Image: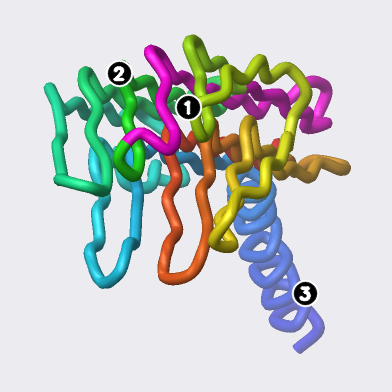
Amino acid sequence: MKEKRASLIAICLAAVLSVIPAVSFAQGTTTFSGEAVGLKASVVGVSLDLADTGPLPSSGGSLNTSLASVNVAGIASADTLKSSTSGSGSTSQSQSTLADVNLLNGLVTATAVKSNTSATCSGGQASVSGNAQLAGLTVAGQSILASNPNLSISLPGGITVIINEQTSSSGGNAGSITVNALHVTGPSLDMVVASAHSDITCS
């Protein structure tokens, strides 16, 4: 009887030990998240979602999309829209670029717009970075030189233009960041130009 019990205990221990390494391996996998969008807008019932990579799988990989041009009368026009997102190794990164941007009949214009984000693991700790670059930017006819993140400009009619809008969080083994090169809001108005998002959870 004792021998049978000892044998049963040994089998149970072997079964438990065989599962533990598999569980540890699953917990020790770095996961990724990311997405890049050239132009996303909702204006008086008109919705746009252009040059959008879609969400990056948690296992990583690479997604790319592009659009030669867009022209929606009175709302937005732009050329050479390109977006990409990727995740591998210890880094998740996203980027979106556009040229000759014109929003709301010239209320906001720029010759070149770009956003980029990155989330990285080092020693099991996550860190994030990102920025937006805008060339030839004008808002309501005024030339704007934007350097610091989250520059907000209020315009008549309750319209707000946020330049180099950044939101991020990082702590321990997880980090996330989103950069919108331009974000225009107002009554029945929400437009985002060159959005890049990166997220990582370190093993």
Crowd tier of the residue under label 1, counting other residues whose Cα lies within 10 Å: few below 14, some 14–19, many 20 or above: many
Front position in the image: 173 or 140 = 140
Is residue 121 within the magenta segment?
yes
* Amino acid at circle 1: Ser
Front position in the image: 163 or 2 = 163
Instruction: Specify the quadrant of the image occupied by residue 42.
Output: bottom left
The residue indicated by pointer 3 is 6
Whole-angstrom CA distance, mark 1 to mark 2, is 21 Å
Front position in the image: 160 or 171 = 160
Residue 194 shows up from this direction: yes
x 51%, y 19%: residue: 137
x 45%, y 45%: residue: 192
* Amino acid at circle 2: Asp
* Amino acid at circle 3: Ala
Q: Nearer the viewer, mark 3 or mark 1?
A: 1
Q: Earlier in the sequence, mark 3 or mark 1?
A: 3
- Which dot marks residue 94? 1
